[in-house]
Amino acid sequence: HAADAHRTDLMTITRFVLNEQSKYPESRGDFTILLNHIVLGCKFVCSAVNKAGLAKLIGLAGETNVQGEEQKKLDVLSNEVFVKALVSSGRTCILVSEEDEEATFVDPSKRGRYCVVFDPLDGSSNIDCGVSIGTIFGIYMMKDNHEPTLDDVLQPGKQMLAAGYCMYGSSCTLVLSTGEGVNRFTLDPSLGEFILTHPDIKIPKKGKIYSVNEGNAKNWDGPTAKYVEKCKFPKDGSSPKSLRYIGSMVADVHRTLLYGGIFLYPADKKSPSGKLRVLYEVFPMSFLMEQAGGQAFTGKQRALDLVPTKIHERSPIFLGSFDDVEDIKALYAAEGKKE
Ligand code: P6P
């Protein structure tokens, strides 16, 4: 019986990745081992986030991170857990975390070939009010077998081998792409395993939702202002789009991936490069969107073509349903022609 088959044929994330990797005869299982350590980190953070209210883990840790923001204890904890898990995997050589000003170069005795860029707990300002938050990560292979340098992580997003996020909300859900589509896994706490629940996710070609912080409207440039105006007062007789903005990137992007529509964090006069970080926010989410049939644009180019020069570099980002992003690309192109 199909339902029984589902219950007994548990496709765990490890089994799923092993199946995928078995297509590459030369793979030695290193990627699967690396991913297992990322999954371990996600399980730990999921447990800590769920207990946060009880364990009084929330509240300020008294330190501030490189972004000058008050660091909450869960940020500190999550970052330490991921750094330790990734180093102990023995498969990484460079780590870039939103929480650490400098990249971590793994000791040669524990070194592997992968570079991991991650935001251990994105949206952490929402911890205290229970809004979904998440871990975002991207994986590069080092450029070649030399001494690792920052160049190994300052690669365009299109060079990523894999990207994903884990969202800590009503359930713990991990969305992953290794370059062959997007798959969603849900943590079964009774098993402590992420089980494949939504294979091969595709984002709707067009959506009815736009997601942007309207509070920044005063500072937007022309094309963004024009696009949002079109969402609210469509000229073609179609109904206006709905606005949904949670203020936690993982939650806003997850909704966009499942329901369709567009997520925007534009440049503005206050922050000319926008707010979101290229390596561990823009690239992983853009990678997932393209793998799901959507697209991601910086206002100037395809997001994954961007070549970062600094590990905490920011970029404007417009990502989501293919047709919706196409619309804002046309407005930027028209602006470009005027200049
Ligand atoms: P704003 C959270 O702090 C975050 O980094 C992302 O998760 C989120 O999308 C964005 O900032 C929200 O920024 O300026 O709208 O509050």
Image (cartoon, helix red, strand yellow):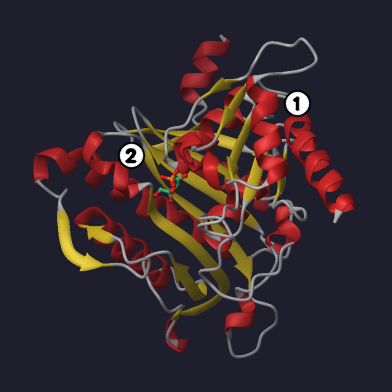
Towards the viewer: 43 or 166: 166
Q: Amino acid at mark 2?
A: Gly
**Which amino acid, by three-letter code, is at mark 1?**
Lys
* Residue 208 on image: x %, y %: 64, 19
Q: How many C-alpha atoms fall within 10 Å of the one at disc 1: few (<14), some, or many (≥20)? A: some
Q: Nearer the viewer, residue 226 or 241?
A: 226
Residue at 66% over, 28% down: 229
- The residues bearing labels 1 and 2 have C-alpha atoms spaced at a distance of 35 Å
Q: Quadrant of the N terminus?
A: top right
- What residue is shown at x 79% (from left), y 40% (from top)? 331
Would you say 228 lies left or right of 40 here?
Answer: right
Q: Residue at x 47, y 41 (%)?
A: 250
Q: Quadrant of residue 119?
A: bottom left
Q: Secondary structure at mark 2?
A: loop
User: What is the tally of numbered marks visible in this picture?
Assistant: 2
Query: Considering the numbered disc 1 on the image, is that residue within a helix, a strand or a loop?
Result: loop
Identify residue for label 1.
Answer: 205
Front-most of 221 and 211?
221
* Residue 200 appears in the picture as rendered: no
Q: Position of residue 334 (x, y in %)?
A: 86, 44
Q: In terms of image quadrants, where is residue 253? A: top right
Residue 251 rendering spot, x and y as whole percentages:
45, 35
Camera-side residue of 140 and 233? 233
x 70%, y 26%: residue? 230
Which residue is label 2 attached to?
Answer: 192
Q: Is residue 180 above or below residue 260?
A: below
